[in-house]
Amino acid sequence: MGTNLDKVVVLTGAGISAESGVPTFRGEAGLWRTYRPEDLATPSAFRRDPALVWEWYNWRRELVARCEPNAAHRTLVEMERHIEDFVLITQNVDGLHQRAGSRRVLELHGSLWRMRCTVEDRVVEDHQVPLPSIPPRCPCGALMRPDVVWFGESLPSEVLSAAHDAVRRCRLLLVVGTSGVVYPAAALPQLAHHAGARVVEFNVERTPISAYADEVILGPAAVALPRWWAAFISAAKSLTAT
Ligand code: BV8
């Protein structure tokens, strides 16, 4: 296990928030079990029934507001403090990385805690739980929409290119709690692997990403990631002590 403390990138998915109580998308109790993605997380669903889509996001905001970051989120805050060239990329929209204390987070799919005017495109941070009115409207009178990336929508280009740059030049990529089925995020581990990075996957089961991983660590992220980081740090210390 390399202990080089530079150019480390971490890609997280819904699994890192599972132990905080946030349902994943595709697990047995996954969000999609209750609602089908094509019904809710798409522009056409929003055009068809903005109130229904906002009911779902309001429910998720209320649920996440009751959750706390877990030891895996906190480990990433430690890593950001210890590693000079560290980049955290997340597919999650729950904001738990920021609540744990991560300062620089590349949010590929946006955030539950931002909304934007469908006419002016103005984005506002909003943490009201529950939402005072559904669907929320902009002072200009237009509908607000969640500031998330829906299926069929492009990811914010500057965020995606920053993520591509980071994985192309990293020496170590940790992939934590993602099923590796949603593109273009799911292509990032392959990019890192082909660019020569060491890829370590943390999950409770193998995924399509496992094929590109030098190491697959099976177990809940809130246990496996802190344990891995403790071993990484002590190996680095013993190396610098010699
Ligand atoms: C786009 C925001 C261009 C909304 C989400 C190829 C290239 C480009 C696009 C595509 C392509 N092929 C198909 C597409 C289309 C589509 C796509 O990928 N579809 C999939 C389903 C096949 N992609 C798009 O539409 C993207 N747009 O590319 O634009 C374009 C434009 C027009 C036409 C075509 C292309 C936009 C994708 C973003 C969608 N938005 N979220 C919201 O959240 O409300 S996606 C949603 O899934 C979440 O963001 C989530 O993060 C993401 C990925 O899921 P995961 O995070 O991996 O979560 P999941 O539940 O799946 O897995 C959890 C994992 O954790 C599991 O492996 C489990 O084992 C593990 N786990 C569980 N517990 C634990 C654990 N691990 C550790 N510890 C535990 N305790």
Image: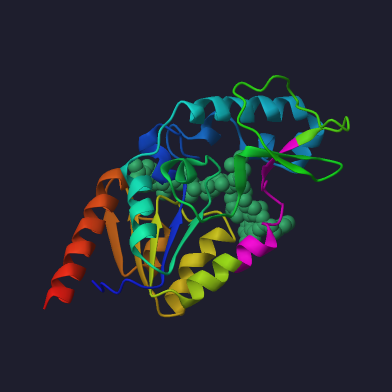
- Coloured how? rainbow
Q: How many marks?
A: 0
Q: Nearer the viewer, residue 221 or 73?
A: 73
Question: Position of 239 compared to 198: left or right?
Answer: left
Q: Residue at x 35, y 37 (%)?
A: 19
Q: Residue at x 52, y 46 (%)?
A: 92
State the image quarter where residue 209 is shown.
Answer: bottom left
Within the magenta stretch, is there residue 54?
no
Q: Is residue 182 above or below residue 97?
A: below
The residue stretch that appears in magenta: 145-161
Q: Position of residue 20 (x, y in %)?
A: 38, 35
Q: Is residue 81 above or below residue 111?
A: below
Q: Residue furthest left?
A: 242
Q: Residue at x 59, y 61 (%)?
A: 184
Q: Is residue 124 above or below residue 209?
A: above
Q: Position of residue 15 (x, y in %)?
A: 41, 45
Question: Position of 15 compared to 237: left or right?
Answer: right
State the image quarter where residue 18 is shown.
Answer: top left
State the image quarter where residue 242 is shown.
Answer: bottom left
Q: Position of residue 40 (x, y in %)?
A: 67, 35
